[in-house]
Amino acid sequence: MRPIGLRRRVIASFAIGALLLSAAMALLSYQLIRTSLTEGRERAAVRAAHFNATVVRAGLTAQDPDIVEILGSLETTGDRQVLVRRNGTWYARSADEGITAAIPAALQDRVADGEPMVQRVRSGGRPVVVVGVPISSSTAFYEVDSLAELERTFRTLAVVLTAVALMTAGAGAVLGWYVTQSVLRPLTSVAEAAEHITAGLVRTRLDPATEPDLARLTTSFNHMVDELADRVERDRRFAADVSHELRSPLQTLSAAAGVLTRRADRLDERTAAAAKLVGEEVDRFQHLVNDLIALARGDQPLDRTPVDIAALARDVCRARHQPTDLVHVDTDEPVWEVDRTRVEQILTNLVENAEKYGGGPTAIRIASNELVVEDQGPGVRPEDRHAIFDRFVRGRTAHDRGTGSDGTGLGLALVAAHAAAHGGAAWVEDNPGGGARFRVRLNGPVR
């Protein structure tokens, strides 16, 4: 299972934290508001019941009182029902619709004993508050107040608070995203700088003034890059100096080997074979030295000129004794602003690589800012596709794709270096028709 990224974890943490906090606040607010409104409604019902009970008590003092008429004189709303129980008989302003059944027997007994009572119950599936007020030993006044409207208010309140909690969680996610953007921005700059250094721009630096809180990281990173650049420069100079120093004795050895080769018919068989072997190894050594010098000069500025890439590719084919019809132009702009010498070496090395390890090139394609060389060999294993462009890397890949005994191990490294100098990159992939497909992208100049 793929681990969750830091950005998502931070955003999720902010969103969940905001949701939990807002949910807790919403629940607390709901409970407080519900308790406050319910108690306020009960107090209002108790006050109204005691006032109405006083009116009923005054009306019952008359000679032969009409209890229904007395109840009709009370000011009540449709949500409030008033009743009187006198000598075991119920009196109401309208027909009994189960209201008397809503009054608990225990509450009636307590009121009959002369104790005012208040209780919340459900009647007909609706919440009501029942208030009982004793008037005399044989008479009690009851008021049943519906809480249905209050319940609707509570449901609306719950929906509103839930929506607020969800919006708060969304706001927390947005805040988390903003925080991660702000926090990870310096790390993104470090990652981009590292990518530039990997691409060959070893002089890339971070600006310490951009993020003062990360000044130590920036300073350490720049110091590391300085050390790396110095090491690369020392290695480059060493390789260049050694290569130049080897050129003179190599030329002498090459001349001597040439003399031996030309006079091989005058030598015995073993000596002639040894002379031929010496000549081949001297040529290979000279090729290696030339490649090292080319790598050492890789950081020099490009000499960009308009170059007909298709014509250059055909020239390379002729020089390598390959048919020129291998070149396919898939772009309307075959003339590019590039360093002709470096691009020629890119094409030459890719064609030579295909000859040695891929059974020969099958196509050279020129697309928009991209060169493609295809071969018919066994291809390159996925685990080797990055390492194959490193210096002196042949090993398993070369042995799978060819003899592995010739070549300097620098051909594809030069291809990658020249591509990076053009602001591009080089990589290899499977050819759908079998074999390997080497791609080189050439972008604008590196500044």
Image (cartoon, rainbow, N blue to C red):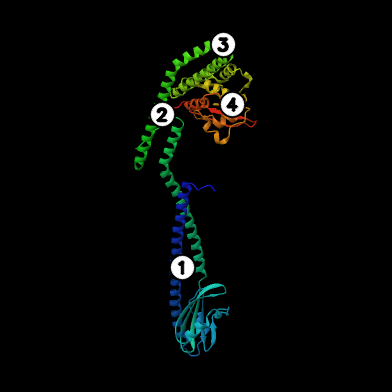
Q: CA distance from mark 2 to mark 1?
A: 74 Å
Name the image quarter holding residue 116: bottom left
The spot of residue 350 in percent (x, y) is 56, 24
Residue at 42% over, 43% down: 184
Query: N-terminal of the two: label 2 or label 3?
Result: 2
The crowding category of the residue bearing disc 3, from other C-alpha atoms within 10 Å (few below 14, some 14 to 19, many at least 20), is: few
Query: N-terminal of the two: label 1 or label 4?
Result: 1
- Tell me the residue that label 2 is attached to: 232
Return the mark for residue 34.
1
Query: N-terminal of the two: label 4 or label 3?
Result: 3
40 lies above or below 160: below
Marks 4 and 3 in Cβ contact (< 8 Å): no
Q: Is residue 331 visible?
A: no
Q: CA distance from mark 2 to mark 4?
A: 32 Å
- Tell me the residue that label 4 is attached to: 403
**Residue type beneath disc 4:** Thr
Query: N-terminal of the two: label 3 or label 1?
Result: 1
